Amino acid sequence: MEQSGREQEPGAVRLLDLPWEDVLLPHVLSLVPLRQLLRLQRVSRAFRALVQLHLAGLRRFDAAQVGPQIPQAALAWLLRDAEGLQELALAPCHEWLSDEDLVPVLARNPQLRSVALAGCGQLSRRALGALAEGCPRLQRLSLAHCDWVDGLALRGLADRCPALEELDLTACRQLKDEAIVYLAQRRGAGLRSLSLAVNANVGDVAVQELARNCPELQHLDLTGCLRVGSDGVRTLAEYCPALRSLRVRHCHHVAEPSLSRLRKRGVDIDVEPPLHQALVLLQDMAGFAPFVNLQV
């Protein structure tokens, strides 16, 4: 930055005199939070050009680094030159993010591997279609609380994303067993993590098909899936040797005998065994605490 009111001291080096691509971009701007970059680009035209060059080379963009809420114009400016993104997270934009905002970004970044759109309720099938069509290397996708995701949208995703490994469909309440069955049959071989939490339309039919088609499945969240029962869990125990964690809280039709086989394998389950629940209850009752051994 130029010193106002006096000449630069002999031998002094201005920040912008340092090599941009060899020094400033990889070793300085890469450490500056996005929120500060928005301020830095207002200092001068030279700093604005430097920041734009840095943004054009971004591999990861998380809107949460800008703040809990990001203006539409700010997002457009931050991403206007980005063409090499591999990770994109836009949850803080959920109140206003539309297809018109997102689709051009997806079109410029075909190398995307991870996209998080949790809560972005203003989007539609068009955005998901553009993602599936234009980003064939996609591995991780969060669509949690996106009510617009339906069976047709999920089919398009399953047909065009061969590398998909992690998918969050929490509270996508339009999805029914048929859509999950299709996903399992088309992409089950590569799926490692899936959340179907808070969806009363998903039942044992979907879970059993997932079990039979997802041998590498490691994490499955069925929290609040009221139609899931013991039959689905037993099939998971039989066909999913890689399973590490299972979430079945508020699945009232899942009984302990169906979970016991998974417990013996060390699978992390968010529901305690009945004996442990009873002991905790006794411990909380006056007069029992000194006599209860929770290691029974």
Image (cartoon, grey):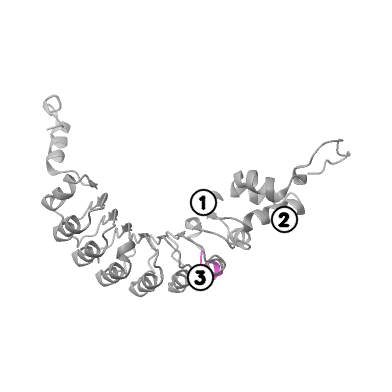
Q: Secondary structure at mark 3?
A: helix
- Let me know if residue 11 appears in the view: yes
Does the magenta stretch mainly form a helix, a strand or a loop?
helix
The kind of residue tagged 2 is Ala
* Sequence-first tag of 3 and 2: 2
The span picked out in magenta is 97-104
Image depth: mark 3 or mark 2 in front = 2
List the residue tagged with mark 1.
64
Callout 1 crowding tier (Cα within 10 Å): few <14, some 14–19, many ≥20: some
Question: Please, is residue 88 above or below residue 104 in the view?
Answer: above
Distance between the alpha carbons at the discs numbered 3 and 2: 28 Å
Q: Are marks 2 and 1 in contact (CB under 8 Å)?
A: no
Near-viewer residue (119 or 142): 142
List the residue tagged with mark 2.
49
Q: Is residue 102 magenta?
A: yes
Identify the residue at image location x=15%, y=40%. Answer: 277
Near-viewer residue (207 or 237): 237
Callout 2 crowding tier (Cα within 10 Å): few <14, some 14–19, many ≥20: few
Q: Is residue 106 magenta?
A: no
Residue 196 spot, x, y in % from top left: 30, 60
List the residue tagged with mark 3.
99
The kind of residue tagged 3 is Asp
The kind of residue tagged 1 is Ala
